[in-house]
């Protein structure tokens, strides 16, 4: 969402602490994809089950236009949302230009988790994905849609392929912010300095253990690893009328390729950092001239909602 972690090294620091600052959400110096979409007047919604991923950057409770439930009603303890849910927007053909669809992370109820992350039941996650795909597939929006299903981890499987360096124009990091030296716009100009940003203490400690000679505010040792290396491969699926049938891409992409595609199609290649500016836009996956998968069948039985007795609604 920001094409950078702006110096943070752990998701334990994902949401700032109220005690540190009156600012409750991260404000990256280079902005987020939400900011770019707003600047260009492109409609977007982050649909969520319990809490949205965008909670790190926006007060989602104060923005019911951009943060809506996946299905009605809104999860407790949040107030009802006057806008349509994802399933309602899909049925009506009123999905926004860009939609982020989040699973249930188990924040409010561990038993409801369906993000396929251990220790949740993978069948519940697959049922959720099938429900989302089926909703778009049967929507009036289907004819010009792309659904990108991405994972953030590899599930512990061995990968025989060496991870390539990050494509970011030779820069050591996406935005000039080194590992463990978090900076942001929470309290400028002080927060724009190394380690001046919100909630950076744990990242400081991690980098000190990784990098001899590291100091939170000093010059970053050139011998130490920076944000210029991709990690282990993770799955990505592109479901669309434009998807090439039986096609496996061999281009190198990364998670910022998803927003690079959005930037290319909607924003004239305006970008956030050196990472998304150089990321592959994934367009080799598609044939925009012929829509080869427009009529690909989807079995509606696969999208049955999960139940307590069978979270995957299948054998």
Image (cartoon, rainbow, N blue to C red):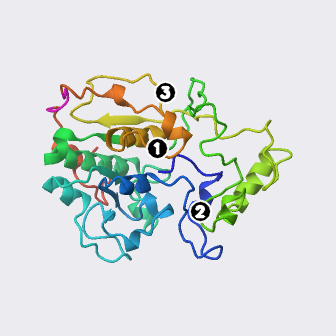
Q: Is residue 156 above or below residue 119?
A: above
Q: Are marks 3 and 2 in contact (CB under 8 Å)?
A: no
**Sequence order check, earlier mark of 3 and 2:** 2
Q: Quadrant of residue 193?
A: bottom right
Judge from the rendering whether residue 139 lies leftward or rightward of residue 192; answer left or right. left
Q: Quadrant of residue 22?
A: bottom right
Give residue 161's position: percent from left, percent from top.
57, 23
Q: Residue at x 49, y 40 (%)?
A: 276
Q: Name the residue carrying label 3.
A: 252
C-alpha gap between disc 3 and disc 2: 32 Å
Q: Residue at x 63, y 31 (%)?
A: 170
Q: Residue at x 39, y 65 (%)?
A: 50
Q: Is residue 2 above or below residue 55?
A: above
Q: Nearer the viewer, residue 306 or 39?
A: 39
| Residue 244 in view of the camera | yes
Residue 185, numbered circle: 2
For disc 2, the neighbor class at 10 Å (few under 14, some 14 to 19, many from 20) is: many
Q: Nearer the viewer, residue 219 or 106?
A: 219
Q: Is residue 160 above or below residue 104?
A: above
Q: Name the residue carrying label 1.
A: 271
C-alpha gap between disc 3 and disc 1: 19 Å
Q: Is residue 166 above or below residue 247?
A: below
Judge from the rendering whether residue 154 lies leftward or rightward of residue 203; answer left or right. left
Q: Are marks 3 and 1 in contact (CB under 8 Å)?
A: no
C-alpha gap between disc 1 and disc 2: 18 Å
**Sequence order check, earlier mark of 3 and 1:** 3
Give the residues in magenta. 291-295
Give residue 130's position: percent from left, percent from top.
27, 46
Label 1, secondary structure: give it: loop
């Amino acid at each position: 969402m920001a094409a950078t972690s702006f110096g943070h090294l752990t998701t334990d620091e994902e949401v700032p602490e109220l005690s540190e600052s009156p600012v409750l959400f991260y404000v990256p110096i280079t902005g987020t994809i939400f900011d770019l979409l707003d600047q260009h007047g492109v409609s977007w919604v982050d649909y969520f089950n319990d809490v949205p991923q965008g909670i790190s950057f926006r007060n989602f409770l104060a923005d019911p236009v951009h943060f809506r439930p996946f299905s009605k009603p809104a999860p407790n303890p949040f107030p009802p949302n006057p806008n349509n849910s994802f399933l309602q927007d899909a049925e009506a053909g009123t999905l926004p230009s860009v939609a982020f669809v989040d699973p249930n992370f188990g924040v409010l109820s561990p038993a409801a988790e369906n993000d396929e992350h251990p220790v949740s039941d993978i069948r519940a996650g697959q049922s959720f994905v099938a429900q989302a795909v089926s909703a778009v597939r049967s929507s009036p929006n289907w004819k010009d849609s792309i659904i990108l299903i991405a994972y953030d981890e590899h599930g512990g499987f061995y990968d025989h392929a060496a991870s390539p360096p990050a494509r970011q124009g030779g820069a050591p990091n996406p935005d000039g912010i080194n590992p463990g030296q978090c900076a942001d716009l929470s309290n400028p100009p002080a927060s724009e300095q190394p380690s001046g940003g919100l909630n950076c203490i744990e990242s400081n400690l991690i980098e000190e253990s990784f990098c001899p000679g590291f100091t939170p505010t000093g010059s970053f040792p050139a011998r130490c690893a920076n944000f210029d290396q991709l990690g282990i491969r993770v799955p990505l699926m592109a479901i669309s009328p434009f998807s090439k049938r039986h096609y496996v891409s061999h281009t190198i992409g990364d998670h910022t390729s998803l927003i690079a595609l959005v930037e290319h199609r909607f924003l004239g290649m305006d970008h956030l950092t050196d990472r998304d500016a150089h990321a592959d836009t994934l367009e080799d996956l598609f044939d925009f001239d012929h829509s080869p998968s427009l009529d690909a069948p989807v079995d509606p039985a696969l999208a049955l909602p999960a139940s307590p007795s069978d979270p995957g609604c299948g054998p």
